[in-house]
Amino acid sequence: METFFSAMESAVYRHVYFVNNAGSLTPILPLTNIPPQQIIDYVHLNITSTILLVKAFVQAVQRLNVRAATLINISSLWAVEPAQDVSLYCIAKSARDMLSRVVALEVSSSIMFYILNLL
């Protein structure tokens, strides 16, 4: 990640975009039927990695002194509406939506930061 974002430092940007569309739907099971290690792996893949990528993006934007940045989060109706047998997916999408909103609050005083949570 750092290599990618540090490569951006050689240019001047007025507006940068980050599109987050990654994620995994499986396992499609009731929560009580999912083994603990599979839950841990799912959280790492779908939540932890997103937090780390967004953090690196915001830090790069701040380092580059960019005037405006847009974080585009491809979300799902399941981020706000529960659905049976996809508990981990619903949780991950909801966590990403909230992460976007919190980051916007944290950086809004220094950067014009736009959030698009697309359902």
Image (cartoon, rainbow, N blue to C red):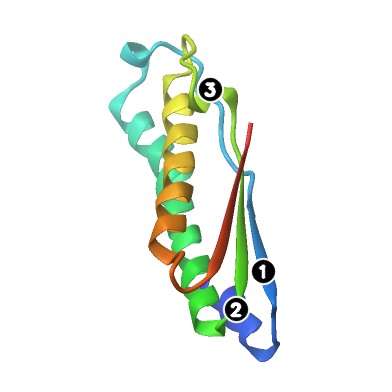
- Residue beneath label 1, please? 16
Q: Nearer the viewer, residue 82 or 49?
A: 82
Q: Nearer the viewer, residue 16 or 27?
A: 16
- In whole angstroms, how far apart are the C-alphas of marks 3 and 1? 28 Å
Query: Where does residue 35 sit, x and y in percent of width and height?
Result: 33, 22
Q: Mark 1 near mark 2, Cβ–Cβ under 8 Å?
A: yes
- Residue beneath label 3, please? 78
For marks 1 and 2, the one nearer the N-term is 1
Label 3 vs label 2, nearer the camera: 2
Q: Which mark is residue 66?
A: 2
At 38% across and 61% down in the image, what residue appears?
Answer: 106
Q: Is residue 31 above or below residue 97?
A: above
At 40% across and 49% down in the image, what residue appears?
Answer: 48
In the rendered picture of this protein, how many numbered marks are placed on residues?
3
Q: Amino acid at mark 3?
A: Trp
Q: Nearer the viewer, residue 38 or 96?
A: 96
Label 1, secondary structure: give it: strand
- In whole angstroms, how far apart are the C-alphas of marks 1 and 2? 8 Å
Label 2, secondary structure: give it: loop
Q: Which mark is residue 43?
A: none
Q: Amino acid at mark 1?
A: Val
Query: Where does residue 33 sit, x and y in percent of width and height?
Result: 35, 12
Q: Is residue 60 above or below residue 21?
A: below
Tell me the quarter of the picture where residue 13 sits. bottom right
Q: Amino acid at mark 2?
A: Val
Residue 53 lies left or right of residue 102; in this view the side is right
